[in-house]
Amino acid sequence: MKFKILNSLRGRYALVTFILSVSLLTGSVVVQSNLISNRDIISSNIANRKQLLQRSRYIRTTIWEARESLALYLLMPSKQQYPEHVHLSIEQAIEHTEQLKQHEWIRKENKLESIEQLRLSLATFDKAVSQLINIRSNPDKQFPSMTIARNNLQNYNNEMVSALSIALSEIITDSHNVLTPEYKKFDRIQTLWTQMISLFRIYLANSIGSYDVTTLPLQEKAIQTFYDDILANINSLKKAAVANKLGFESSDALKTIETAVKKWGVGYRQILNVHRSDDWRADVSIVKELIEPDIKRIWSILQSLDIAIESSSNEDVSTLTNIAEEQVIILWLITIIGLVFLIMGFYFLELLVLRPIANVSHALKQEAIGDEEQDIAIDTNIIETRNLVDAFDEMRLQVHERQNLLEHQALHDSLTGLANRTLLFDRLQYAIRTSRRENKKLALLMLDLDRFKEVNDTLGHQVGDALLVEIGLRLKNTLREADTIARLGGDEFAILLSNTEPAQAEYISKKVHTSLEEMFHINDLKLYIKASIGIVLYPEHGNTANVLLQKADVAMYVAKRNKLGHAFYSADHDQHSVGRLALMTDLRIALQKNQLELYFQPKVSLINGKLTGFEALLRWNHNKYGAIPPGQIIPLAEQTGAISDITKWVMEKVLIQLQDWRKQGINLDISINLSVYSIFDTELVKELTEMLADNIAINHHLTLEVTESAMMEHPEQAVEVLNKFDKLGVRMSIDDFGTGFSSLAYLKRLPVDELKIDKSFVLDMHDNENDAVIVRSTIDLAHNLGLNVVAEGIEDKDSYDLLSILGCDIAQGYFISHPLPISELHELLQPDYSHKSK
C-alpha cells in the first residue's frame, strides 16, 4: 500500500520524469547563470542588427509586392489598382532606403555608397514600370496581331458571311426540290468557315494569354486543315461555275468568297509569323531590358548588405563561441548525467510501461483473429492496463451494434423498415446478372398509391406515415420472402420478383391489389387505398437496372393516368402520346388560373461569397400528374403558342418581386430565360416597355438570358431585338455560351453584359483538359470585352474553388443551392449571408 502509486503507468512515469527533471534543471541553472553574465555584452549589437535587417527585409518585401502587383496587372490590365500599388511600393522602398542612410551601422561600416546605388536603382525601376504600364494599357501597342485580326481578318470574315448568304439564298433546290450538290458545297464551306473562325478565336485568345502553348501547334494544324478543305470546295465550285451550274449571283459570290478566303489566309499567316517571332508582345523587351536588370541590381545590392550583416553576425558568434567553450566542461557533465538517467529511464519504461502494453496489444490481436487457445499473461496489477481491457470489450460491443445499425439505416427506409432505393438498385443489378447467367426472367413492379396526397393533406402526415407502415406490412405478408420490397420515397414502392414469367408478374400484381383493397384501420379511422402498378420484364424491356427502373416508372404512370390498376411497359408509352393533348390544354388553364410557380436559384460572387441575385425558373405542379419537368413545359408552350403568354407572366411576376424587394431595401438581380420564339416576338418588346413604365427604377436589376444557339439561328434579327431590349435599360446575358458557333464579330455587336458558361464545360473541368481550357479562355475573352462571367452547373467545392482561381465572377449550381420557392429565401436574403461562411 505504501507504493500503490507505482501500480499505475502515470505514477511510474511521474517518478522517472521527476528524477530526470531535477537533474537537468540543476545543470541548466548552472549554465544559465554563466550565460546571463555575458548577455549584456552582445545585446546592443543584436538590437542594432535586428533593426537593420527589418528595414532591409521591408525593402525586399515592398519590391516583391511591386513585382507581384506588376505581374497581376499584366494578367488583368483592367485592374487600375495594381499600377498604383506598384508605384506606392517603390516609393515606400525608397523611403526606407533614405532611412537606412541614417542608420548607425551603415555609417560605421561605410555602406553609404551602396545605399545610394540602391536608391538610384529603385528610381530607375520606377521609370521602367511607368513605361511598361503605358505600353500594357494599349493593346495595339502590346499585341501587333490584334491589329491585324481587327483591321483585316474581321472584314474578310464579314465579306465571307455575306457572300455565303447570297449564294445559299440563290441555290436552294433543283427542279425536284432536292438540295443540289452546289448548295451542299456552299453549305459545307459555311460550316467549315464557322468552325475555323471559332477555333481561330480560341487560338488567338490562347496565344495572346499564353495559357497553354503546347496546344497552339495542334490548333494551328486544325485551322490549316479547315482552310485547305474550304479551298478544295471553292475549286470544285469554280468548275461548276465554268459548267454554268451556278447562277449569276452565286458565281459572283463565289469570286468574293475566294478572294476573302485567300486574303484571310494571308492575314492569318502574318499573325503566325508575329506569334512565332520575339516581337509578339511589345512589353517583353521592357521587362527583359529594363525591369529584370533593375530587379537583379536591387537584389544584388541587398544581397551584399545581407553579407555584410552576416559578417557582423559572425563576429558576435565568435564572441559567443568563446563563452560557449568555457561551458563545455559543464555541458559534458550534464550530458553524461542525462545519458545515465536516459538509459535508466528507458529500462524502467520498458519494464513498467512498454512490456505490459505490448502484452495487452498482443492479447487483443489474438482475440481479434479468433485465437482463443493462447494464454497471454497480462499484468492486471496496472490500473491503466486493466481499464484498457475493460474499455476495449465495451467499445467492441458498441461498435458492432452501431455498425449493424448504420448498415441497416443506409440500406432501409427509416419509416417502414423496407429496403430503400440503394438496396433495391443493388439487388436489381445482382438479379439481372443472375438471370443473364441462368437464362431466366425477372419482373420489376413500380407501385404508386392513388390519392395518397389527399390523406396527408386532410388527415395529416402522421396518419399518412402510419398508413405507409401498414401498407409495407401487407406487402410483406402478400409476397414471398425471396422477393424484395422497397420504398423509393413518398408513396412510391417497388417490388423485385426474381425468376418470374409475365403471367406470374400479373398474378402477383393482382394479389397486391387484393391485399390493399381491404380496409385500413389507422387511429380509429377507416381508410381505403388503391394503387397503380407498372410492370417491366427482363430482358424484354431492358437489360440494365437504370433502364428497368425508368421504364417501370413510365408504365406506372400509364396505369395511373388510364386507371388500369396495372400496366405492362410498352414502347408506345415513351412517345408521350397518351394525355399529351390534354397536357397542352391544362397548361393554358394553369396559366389562366395562376397555377404556375417560380422557383429562384441563387447566384453568388466568387470573390466574397455574397449573394448577387437569382435565376427565375418555371415550375408546374399538375394536380393529376404531379410535377411536370421544365424540359416538358417549354416545348408544350412553344407548340401550343402559349410561350408568349408564359413569358409575359414570368416577367410580370419577376418585376413585382423586384419592386417588393426594393421597398425592403434589397437590391438584387433576377434573370429570366427567353425562348427562341420570344426573341423574335415583335410584341414582347412593347409589352416589356409597358411593364417597366411604372418600374423604371428596377429595370437594371432585370436580366434577360438568351441561349447562344437561339441567337445564332438569325443573328442579324437577334442583334436588332437585343438592341431594343438594351434601350430599355435591362441587362442582357448569353446563356449556354460555348455550345454554339457565335463569332467575335457578332459578339462585339451584341449589347450584352455577361456570358454564362454552359454547365457541360464546368462539370468536366477536372477530368477534361479541353473543357478547362475553354472555360479559362472564355473568362479571359469576356473580361477583355468588359463582360461579367457566370458559371452554372457547379456541383462541388473543387469546381467552385477552381473557377474562383480562374477569375470567374459569379457562381450558380447545386453546390450553392437548389432552386427554391420564394417562401424559402429568407436565410439567403439576410444582409450578413455569405456562401463562404457556410
Image (cartoon, rainbow, N blue to C red):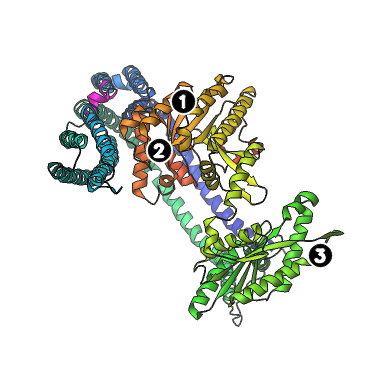
- What type is the residue that disc 2 sits on? Glu
Quadrant into which the C terminus falls: top right
Quadrant into which the N terminus falls: bottom right
Q: Are marks 2 and 3 in contact (CB under 8 Å)?
A: no
Identify the residue position indicated by label 3 in the image.
519
Identify the residue position indicated by label 2 in the image.
708
- What type is the residue that disc 1 sits on? Phe
Q: Main secondary structure of the magenta part?
A: helix
Q: Which of the two discs, 2 and 3, labels the residue nearer the N terminus?
A: 3
CA–CA distance between discs 2 and 1? Answer: 16 Å
Residue 626 in magenta stretch: no
Question: Residue 587 versus residue 201: which sits nearer the camera?
Answer: 587
- What type is the residue that disc 3 sits on? Met
Q: Which of the two discs, 3 and 1, labels the residue nearer the N terminus?
A: 3
Identify the residue position indicated by label 1 in the image.
725
Residue at x-position 53% and y-position 26%: 688
Q: Which residues are magenta?
A: 134-143
